[in-house]
């Protein structure tokens, strides 16, 4: 091959590699398989090694190392990023206010002020400024660790690289990255049919998370702040913080309103709901938060949600369609859910062809049959569901009957006393339950393995490459088979293995949640992690009923489920296998400078200064452990008015009893 031909081939390879990199990383729409792409890379590398003097200035190897990142680095947030609990009607808002009043031990909410603002449907971002200089930007991720997108956001106008005067030494500014509807439409016009984004939120996320930074910079992304994380300065109210943001050239939403009552909140919610079609960005609700930062601090958090804020979702979108057939899905806990296959219908810009029927009690209650005309609803991110019967097809409709056997493994079906749900009895043998457990294990809230979604799990399970959760750590031995499958190749397989390896460090609470124990959600997993600190201690205590019953916040169903889970050899074998593959991080024992640090407290009676819930929460923030009943393990009984039999038991056991005044003094309130 002569010199001229070599250069021409290198130029052609550079052009092809650049084009297919763009299709893969930017449009998320590869035109060739990974195998074909890898072949181009290998040919280019071979020629460059053989003829180093002919390497092009725009060689793919040079471009990829400078302009395009290989992947996103992880970034740890200085303070956790929380998510908002949802409300769907006026009664939910009333309950939110009622809970806040009760927690703070107040008579009413007359002294509350609420900051209300539209909830932008975008991508959450955490900006860190030190001495006024922007040092990093990270996506929410799992709330603790996100992706470092600092370079990608540098061209967003509402994010200054330096704050103006009167800035704190350190601050985390939180907000939403989004695309205006008009900009979204212009962007989609430039893309071919297959590459078009489904909605502005997907377009914003896709534009921000670009390995090729120049793509992010070319997109008209916007940013609106809505929160604050860790900060070296103190603000008294949300509104004063927002005023300061304006001084720093970070403009808050222009549709913010301060309300003083439930009635004012509802009026403003209706106003925003009516005008949302005219707003040039997508919103999916109204955020209501208590204005006072002091009250926010007292209210604190429950699990992943702040007690001091809530998101009111807009009213559900509705449409009428016909149920064409019904089939059944079996989840990881064996729950059998009837799913209506619908005559496709447009609902809020999305074509809906499936909707949940919840359970068979609901079907009977609504008198729904196949071929009936029904109403379907979809609110926010909730899965569409059949809400009511519109018109019966009296001539052709057929009754929807519950299955006598599991539709997947044909095992017997069970119905527990206090449940409306049917369950497959073959817990550890049903393939659908196995797949469900693996999908849960690799999901964002558990191991958070990028590129390992439901589609990939089902494909690898059905081909017998994985059969249980721990099998994902042995996929490398099937490399030659997997890279030749449709949709795979050396690049995508390598990316998956890297994602799996990057997920091997996991906190104890996430590990407990990832096991998929019934009734152990994120909140209960956090309670258990805080109580036992280490996995082995949790395992050894898993059959101790009295110990589990004494953990504040853990209910009888959760306790029974824990005992049942660890009584099965198959589960203990899985945990041992996972311990060999994962590095489980434990909650550090913080050195609290407080009298109650690492002490076990029990509360009884009625408190006057605080509610009992707030007193418990306050004690936990000072390093105390809260127990639900008196035992030898108890260090202090905090007794309010009308204390019951717990005082007698504490006296017999020689446990120190403190009244409310003593408690408040010793906790330094």
Image (cartoon, rainbow, N blue to C red):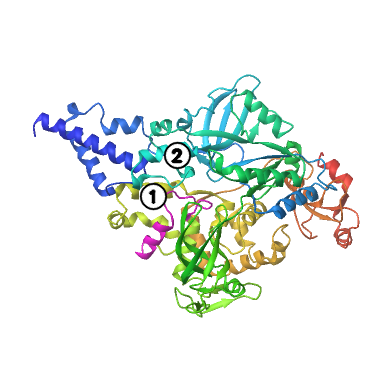
Name the residue rendered at 55%, 53% in the picture: 381
- Residue 230 relative to residue 20: left or right: right
Q: Is residue 388 above or below residue 111?
A: below
- The outermost residue toward the left is 2
* SS at mark 1 in the image: helix
Q: Which mark is residue 496?
A: 1
Q: Position of residue 352 (x, y in %)?
A: 47, 59
The residue identified by callout 2 is 184
Residue nearest the observer in this picture, 585 or 411: 411
Q: Residues within 10 Å of mark 2 (few under 14, many from 20)?
A: many
Residue nearest the observer in this picture, 83 or 592: 83
Q: Position of residue 25 (x, y in %)?
A: 36, 41
Residue 174 highlighted magenta (yes or no): no
- The outermost residue toward the top is 165
Q: Quadrant of the C terminus?
A: top right
Which is in the foreground here, disc 2 or disc 1? 2
Residue nearest the observer in this picture, 283 or 458: 283
Residue 448 highlighted magenta (yes or no): yes
- Residue 643 relative to residue 327: left or right: right
- Residue 546 relative to residue 607: left or right: left
Q: Position of residue 572 (x, y in %)?
A: 53, 64
Q: Position of residue 51 (x, y in %)?
A: 16, 31
- Residue 374 relative to residue 596: left or right: left
Magenta stretch, residue numbers: 442-465
Say if residue 182 shows up in the picture.
yes
Name the residue rendered at 18%, 26% in the picture: 53
Q: Which mark is residue 390?
A: none
Say if residue 169 shows up in the picture.
no
Q: How far apart are the two marked residues, 2 and 1, measured between alpha carbons?
A: 30 Å
* SS at mark 2 in the image: helix
Q: Quadrant of the N terminus?
A: top left
Q: Residues within 10 Å of mark 1 (few under 14, many from 20)?
A: some
């Amino acid at each position: 091959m002569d010199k001229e031909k070599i250069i021409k081939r290198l130029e052609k390879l550079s052009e092809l590699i650049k084009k297919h990199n763009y299709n893969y990383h930017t449009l998320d729409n590869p035109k060739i398989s990974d195998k074909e792409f890898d072949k181009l890379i290998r040919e280019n590398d071979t020629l460059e090694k053989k003829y180093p003097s002919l390497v092009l200035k725009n060689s793919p190897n040079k471009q990829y190392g400078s302009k395009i990142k290989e992947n996103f680095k992880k970034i740890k947030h200085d303070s956790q990023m929380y998510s908002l609990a949802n409300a769907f009607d006026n009664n939910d808002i009333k309950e939110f206010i009622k809970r806040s009043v009760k927690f703070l031990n107040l008579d009413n909410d007359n002294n509350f002020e609420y900051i209300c603002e539209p909830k932008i449907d975008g991508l959450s971002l955490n900006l860190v400024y030190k001495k006024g200089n922007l040092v990093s930007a990270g996506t929410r991720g799992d709330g603790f660790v996100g992706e470092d997108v600092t370079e990608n956001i540098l061209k967003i106008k509402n994010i200054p690289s330096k704050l103006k005067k009167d800035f704190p030494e350190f601050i985390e500014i939180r907000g939403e990255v989004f695309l205006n509807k008009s900009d979204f439409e212009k962007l989609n016009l430039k893309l071919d049919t297959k590459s078009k984004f489904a909605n502005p939120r997907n377009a914003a996320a896709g534009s921000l998370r670009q390995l090729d930074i120049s793509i992010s910079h070319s997109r008209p992304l916007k940013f609106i702040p809505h929160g604050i994380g860790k900060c070296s300065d103190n603000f008294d109210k949300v509104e004063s913080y927002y005023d300061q943001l304006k001084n720093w050239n970070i403009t808050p939403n222009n549709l913010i309103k301060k309300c003083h009552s439930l009635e004012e909140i509802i009026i403003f919610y209706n106003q925003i709901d009516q005008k949302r079609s005219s707003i040039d960005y997508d919103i999916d609700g109204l955020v209501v938060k208590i204005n006072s930062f002091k009250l926010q601090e007292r209210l604190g958090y429950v699990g992943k949600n702040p007690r001091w804020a809530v998101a009111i979702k807009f009213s559900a979108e509705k449409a009428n369609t016909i149920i064409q057939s019904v089939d059944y899905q079996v989840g990881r806990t064996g729950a059998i859910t009837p799913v209506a296959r619908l005559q496709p219908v447009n609902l809020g810009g999305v074509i809906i062809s499936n909707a949940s029927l919840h359970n068979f009690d609901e079907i009977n209650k609504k008198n729904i049959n196949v071929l009936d005309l029904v109403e379907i609803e979809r609110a926010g991110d909730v899965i569409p569901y059949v809400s009511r019967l519109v018109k019966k097809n009296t001539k052709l409709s057929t009754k929807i009957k519950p299955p006598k056997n599991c539709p997947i493994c044909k095992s017997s079906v069970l119905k527990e006393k206090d449940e409306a749900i049917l369950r497959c009895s073959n817990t550890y043998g049903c393939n659908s339950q196995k797949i469900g457990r693996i999908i849960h294990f690799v999901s964002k809230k558990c191991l958070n393995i990028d590129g390992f979604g439901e589609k990939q799990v089902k494909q690898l399970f059905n081909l017998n490459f994985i059969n249980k959760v721990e099998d994902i750590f042995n996929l490398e031995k099937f490399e030659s088979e997997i890279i030749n499958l449709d949709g795979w190749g050396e690049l995508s397989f390598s990316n998956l293995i890297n994602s799996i390896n990057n997920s091997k460090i996991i906190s104890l609470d996430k590990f407990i949640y990832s096991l998929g124990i019934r009734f152990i959600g994120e909140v209960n997993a956090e309670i258990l992690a805080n109580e036992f600190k280490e996995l082995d201690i949790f395992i050894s205590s898993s059959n101790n009923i009295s110990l589990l019953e004494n953990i504040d916040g853990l209910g009888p169903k959760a306790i029974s489920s824990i005992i049942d889970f660890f009584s099965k050899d198959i589960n203990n074998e899985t945990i041992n296998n996972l311990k060999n593959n994962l590095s489980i991080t434990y909650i550090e024992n913080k050195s609290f400078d407080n009298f109650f640090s690492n002490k076990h407290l029990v509360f009884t009676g009625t408190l006057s200064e605080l509610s009992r819930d707030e007193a418990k929460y306050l004690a936990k923030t000072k390093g105390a452990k809260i127990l639900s009943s008196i035992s030898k393990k108890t260090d202090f009984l905090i007794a309010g008015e009308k204390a019951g039999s717990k005082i007698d038991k504490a006296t017999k056991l020689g446990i120190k009893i403190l009244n409310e005044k003593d408690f408040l003094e010793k906790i330094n309130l």
